Image (spheres, rainbow, N blue to C red):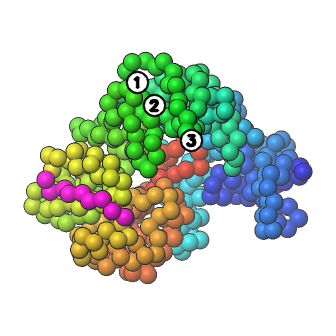
């Protein structure tokens, strides 16, 4: 069913909001102020979802999507290719401000900032996970679908990802193929086989490492080393297999600088780095607090903990432990901290973790978030424990998509 809509403001998730017969319609591929013909793709008792399939009155911010696979019914990886980069950042600014206003009662006056390294918004994604169809052809998922859009190139993928050439090879019996290009010039492919199947890995350049994903965070090396090297400033970080690392080439350095600016760690202080990954923030904190201070990192992935210990082996004031944050603080008897850095997954901290962190009586909490909704919710809960938002910066670490990275400073 197609309906004519006048498009209203942006909503979190890559949508704009319109109304039809008294119901809210979340519209993709549209921009605020446009009049569009939209195809209804989903109907619930409370709202509709739709794709703008014809633009009757375009916004001045509309551009032709650079990628031929972007658009209704095609690849779901990008949300805003039809908007100029400046407009994309304004849309994300509106989303961050709206979430903070609605969920935390805070009026934020900032703007989403560019991250160096992708001036045209393309060629930035250093880690791309492709789906594989039954014939072994690589593609990307369509929006809110398990269907696969075959692609021969991804325009937001980093050039060194594209140089592997995975999209033009056959990957029969694989369920997914992740291609990684590290900031140190290394490349890897991580192959996840279908259940009870063996993947015949196609011929790749001999410099490309190949891993098989065996599930539960385990990878088996087929060729090359079992890890990649990521470089930030003059420090190298080992990341084993397909472990977590920021996908924008400028994001790690940008976020580290912002975390250290907000945290303002001082010599001799006691800092916590929760959800610490392979130790990016812990490294900066440990250097700042010095040998008379201490940093304790908590991470649930055992492989990441081992990487962090190796990456910071020259900083004995930094120690790491495996555990889930919700029980690790109790298990390790952590009762206080001068400052706390948290970088949780998209689901955020949650009420219980917020409450436990508040018991530490830290003067500063620096919160790194990839979801402004869960960030705003947790900021509201931290306010119940006496913490107020002192500063917040937002970064366009995922151009062409609706995702945004935020760093917030909360003070007691």
Task: Assess whether residue 76 is covered by the magenta stretch.
Answer: no
* For residue 323, side relative to residue 296 (left or right): right
Q: Quadrant of the C terminus?
A: bottom left
- Gap in Å between the C-alphas at discs 1 and 2? 7 Å
Q: In the image, what residue occupies the spot 79% across and 64% down?
A: 44
Mark 1 neighbour density, 10 Å: few (under 14) some (14–19) many (20 or more): some
Of labels 1 and 2, earlier in sequence is 2
* In-front residue for pair 22/331: 331
Disc assigned to residue 239: none
Res. 259 in view: no
The stretch of residues the image draws in magenta is 316-324
Q: Which residue is mark 2?
A: 189
Disc assigned to residue 208: 1
x then y, percent, for residue 357: 34, 73
Give the quadrant of residue 71: top right
Mark 3 neighbour density, 10 Å: few (under 14) some (14–19) many (20 or more): few
Q: In the image, what residue occupies the spot 44% across and 67% down?
A: 349
Marks 3/1 in contact by CB < 8 Å: the verdict is: no
Looking at the image, is 226 positioned above or below residue 369? above
Tag 3 secondary structure: loop
Of labels 3 and 2, earlier in sequence is 2
Tag 2 secondary structure: strand
Q: In the image, what residue occupies the spot 67% across and 28% down?
A: 135
Marks 1/2 in contact by CB < 8 Å: the verdict is: yes
Residue that sits furthest to the left in the current view: 292
Mark 2 neighbour density, 10 Å: few (under 14) some (14–19) many (20 or more): many
Q: In the image, what residue occupies the spot 28% across and 46% down?
A: 307
* For residue 277, side relative to residue 135 (left or right): left
x then y, percent, for residue 394: 47, 54
Q: Which residue is mark 3?
A: 195
* In-front residue for pair 304/59: 304
């Amino acid at each position: 069913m197609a309906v004519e809509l006048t498009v209203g403001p942006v909503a979190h998730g890559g949508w704009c909001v319109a109304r039809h017969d008294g119901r809210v319609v979340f519209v993709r591929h549209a921009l605020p102020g446009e009049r569009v013909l939209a195809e209804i793709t989903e109907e619930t008792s409370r709202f509709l979802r739709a794709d703008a399939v014809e633009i009757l009155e375009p916004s001045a911010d509309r551009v032709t999507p650079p990628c031929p696979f972007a658009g209704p019914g095609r690849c779901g990886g990008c949300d805003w290719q039809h908007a100029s980069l400046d407009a994309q950042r304004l849309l994300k600014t509106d989303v961050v401000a709206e979430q903070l206003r609605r969920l935390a009662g805070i009026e934020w006056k900032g703007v989403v900032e560019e991250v160096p390294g992708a001036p045209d918004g393309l060629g930035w994604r250093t880690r791309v996970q492709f789906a594989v169809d039954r014939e072994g052809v690589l593609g990307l998922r369509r929006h809110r679908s398990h269907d696969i859009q075959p692609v021969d190139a991804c325009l937001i993928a980093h050039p060194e990802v594209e140089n592997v050439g995975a999209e033009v090879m056959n990957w029969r019996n694989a369920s997914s193929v992740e291609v990684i290009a590290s900031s140190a010039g290394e490349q890897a492919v991580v192959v996840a086989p279908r259940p009870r199947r063996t993947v015949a890995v196609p011929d790749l350049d001999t410099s490309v490492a190949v891993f098989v994903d065996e599930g539960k965070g385990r990878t088996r090396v087929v060729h090359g080393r079992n890890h990649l090297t990521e470089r930030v400033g003059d420090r190298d970080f080992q990341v084993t297999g397909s472990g977590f690392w920021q996908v924008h080439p400028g994001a790690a350095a940008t976020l580290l600088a912002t975390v250290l600016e907000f945290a303002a760690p001082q010599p001799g202080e006691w800092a916590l780095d929760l959800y610490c990954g392979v130790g990016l923030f812990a490294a900066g904190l440990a250097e700042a607090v010095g040998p008379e201070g201490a940093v304790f990192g908590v991470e649930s992935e055992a492989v990441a903990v081992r990487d962090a210990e190796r990456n910071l082996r020259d900083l004995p004031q930094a120690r790491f432990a495996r555990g889930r944050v919700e029980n690790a603080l109790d298990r390790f008897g952590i009762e206080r901290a001068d400052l706390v850095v948290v970088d949780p997954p998209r689901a955020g901290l949650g009420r219980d973790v917020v409450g436990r962190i508040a018991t530490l009586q830290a003067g500063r909490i620096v919160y790194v978030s990839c979801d402004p909704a869960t960030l705003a919710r947790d900021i509201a809960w931290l306010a119940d424990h006496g913490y107020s938002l002192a500063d917040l910066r937002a970064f366009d670490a995922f151009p062409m998509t609706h995702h945004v990275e935020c760093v917030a400073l909360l003070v007691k």
